[in-house]
Amino acid sequence: MNAIVPGELVTLNPMVRRITAPNPGMMTGPGTNTYLIGGNEVAVIDPGPEIDSHRDTILSAVGKRLRWILCTHTHLDHSPGARALHAATGAPVHGRSAPQDGRQDSGFAPQRVLDHGDIVDCGMFRLRALHTPGHASNHLCYLLEGHGLLFTGDHVMQGSTVVISPPDGDMVAYLRSLNLLLGMDLKEIAPGHGHVIPGPHEEVRKIIAHRLQRERKVIDAFARRNPATLDELVPLVYDDVSPRLHQAARRSLHAHLIKLAADGRIAETPEGWKS
């Protein structure tokens, strides 16, 4: 598998190309993937962050053929680039409005707000929106109908698990949204970060199993410290993860605790979380 090179135009199949933004990092892997779908008329999924070189690479690849701009969600590495593309081409922006939790692209203003099951009819192809909250409450995946290719943004990433960060991130919703994909006819996943993933159902089952295994580690941690604060639980639950990732892990741990409290298995007390 070739390394992902930011700025490189990669043909994935006759209908789909990928350009990865130059924003590699701990949370973004090799960078945020922007997908170009179509030929004479093109749809772009996830224009990425506001980086001039990335905008110019997209515009160079699509020319005057850009007709639709779609965003999976409004985290700052996925949607801000939509403004410049819309200004340059007039192509309408599709997606869901940004939640106000301080981690979003608050200026995101879609011309079309998409609900679960809505179709974006692009003439030679159709993209079906799937509302998949969990990583973000406004998260959408897009199914390229008739091809079984699902563009998953941060719902499913290649090579790593996503952070679920309350209050907008929700572990219950995330697991429900993952289970939604198991009932669909899928052939491949085109993630927001990393390479195309074959065997999509197997991948989704692995993610669900990983999350439930982590949940069991949360419960087991209370045998060692009860009650416990978030900061006390992180090194117990994420003892298999590098300490440099513990700050991000703390956010997903919080989401696990909220889910377990909703399940009636633990409770939050003045002294901390208690089983």
Image: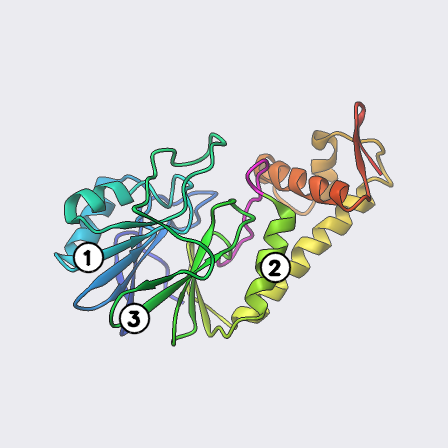
Q: Looking at numbered disc 2 in the image, what kind of residue is underneath it?
A: Ile
Q: Who's the residue at 66% across and 54% down the image?
A: 211
Residue closest to the eye, 243 or 111: 111
Question: Which element type, helix, strand or loop, lies under badge 2?
Answer: helix
The magenta region covers 158-169
Residue closest to the eye, 128 or 272: 128
Q: Looking at numbered disc 3 in the image, what kind of residue is underneath it?
A: Phe
Mark 1 to mark 3 CA distance (whole Å): 14 Å
Q: Kindly identify which residue carries mark 2.
A: 207
Across and down, in percent, residue 99 comes to: 47, 37
- Mark 2 vs mark 3: which is more N-terminal? 3
- Mark 1 vs mark 2: which is more N-terminal? 1
Q: Nearer the viewer, mark 1 or mark 2?
A: 1
Q: Looking at numbered disc 1 in the image, what kind of residue is underneath it?
A: Leu
Q: Nearer the viewer, mark 2 or mark 3?
A: 3
Residue 125 is marked as: 3
Q: Residues within 10 Å of mark 3 (few under 14, many from 20)?
A: some
Residues under numbered marks 1 and 3 in contact, where contact means CB atoms less than 8 Å apart: no
Left or right, 130 with reference to 163? left
Left or right, 117 with reference to 208? left
The image quarter in which residue 140 lies: bottom left
